[in-house]
Amino acid sequence: MTPRRNARRVAAGVEPGGGYPYADRVARQACLLDAFDTILDCDFTAFRSDLPALAGIPAEAMITEFGRIMPALATGRFSMAEGFRQILPACGVEPRPGLVSALVSKGRELLLAAARLYDDVLPFLEKLRSRGIAIAIVSNCDENMREVLSELGVSAFADALALSCEVGAAKPEARIYRHALEALGVTAEAALFVDDNAAFCAAGAAVGLSAVQIVRGQAEAKVVPGITVVRSLPEVEAMF
């Protein structure tokens, strides 16, 4: 969906690839938002205990194997079921269909239970929509993310969901940023990108986006020179 051009000119912002506030250069029409640790907080403790227990394998072994196949899960080359069919024999367990199905269901259940939005997310999304700003979620994720975003109320505000498992490309690949921009019908110059990951911010800036790194509740974080750092979404709102 092509968004209505924002009537207000930008009073503050970040030049693509860095720089500091500039005025009246371009009317920002869109905001691209990361999910995990940007709008979404998720405690994975239960994953590290409950899934290995259900599978009957050591937690460290499952964590190691998840790390090995994560790129395939994130880009949709593996479904969660195929992922577990890979993990189980690598850990010495037969990938019985019933066990694979139980693990898929348990993983989905745990994610839905553990995921929560930061307090400033829904007010931020509401304010952007009220100003005619288009919104896309750009996330490295598996097949469960679409349901999570729907359950938490994010999908109702989003004009596009650029999910790596559906796009077939994950940040920092340029393709996922361009996919989001095309879905919104805007140019990179007219969009702001917010992510907690410094490397993903740099990659966004490389395709022409104004990138902002959000650092939530951390005393220190890896940052990229020239990328503006904020602590909350109200600070981002002021850039529109």
Image (spheres, grey):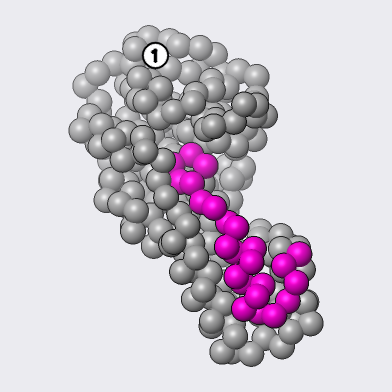
Q: Is residue 73 above or below residue 236?
A: below
Q: Is residue 87 above or below residue 172?
A: below
Please state which of residues 121 and 26 is positioned toward the viewer in this rendering: 121
- Give coordinates of residue 222: x percent, y percent: 67, 29
Q: Check residue 150 for magenta coloring.
A: no
Specify whether residue 113 is in view.
yes
Please state which of residues 228 and 183 is positioned toward the viewer in this rendering: 228
- Give coordinates of residue 198: x percent, y percent: 62, 32
Which stretch is magenta?
Answer: 37-60
Q: How many marks?
A: 1
Taking the spot 52% from the left edge, 42% from the top edge, the residue there is 37
Left or right of 107? Residue 136 is left
Q: Looking at the figure, which quarter contains the N terminus?
A: top left
Specify whether residue 132 is in view.
no
> What amino acid does circle 1 point to?
Ala
Please state which of residues 50 and 88 is positioned toward the viewer in this rendering: 50
- Classify mark 1: residues with Cα within 10 Å, few (<14), some (14-19) or many (20+): some
Taking the spot 29% from the left edge, 16% from the top edge, the residue there is 9
- Give coordinates of residue 99: x percent, y percent: 59, 85
Q: Looking at the figure, which quarter contains the C terminus?
A: top left
Left or right of 222? Residue 75 is left
- Give coordinates of residue 216: x percent, y percent: 52, 32
Please state which of residues 98 and 50 is positioned toward the viewer in this rendering: 50
Q: Residue 67 appears in which quarter of the rendering?
A: bottom right
Q: Residue 80 appears in which quarter of the rendering?
A: bottom right
Q: Check residue 43 for magenta coloring.
A: yes
Taking the spot 49% from the left edge, 23% from the top edge, the residue there is 230
Taking the spot 33% from the left edge, 57% from the top edge, the residue there is 150
Q: Secondary structure at mark 1?
A: loop
**Residue holding disc 1:** 12
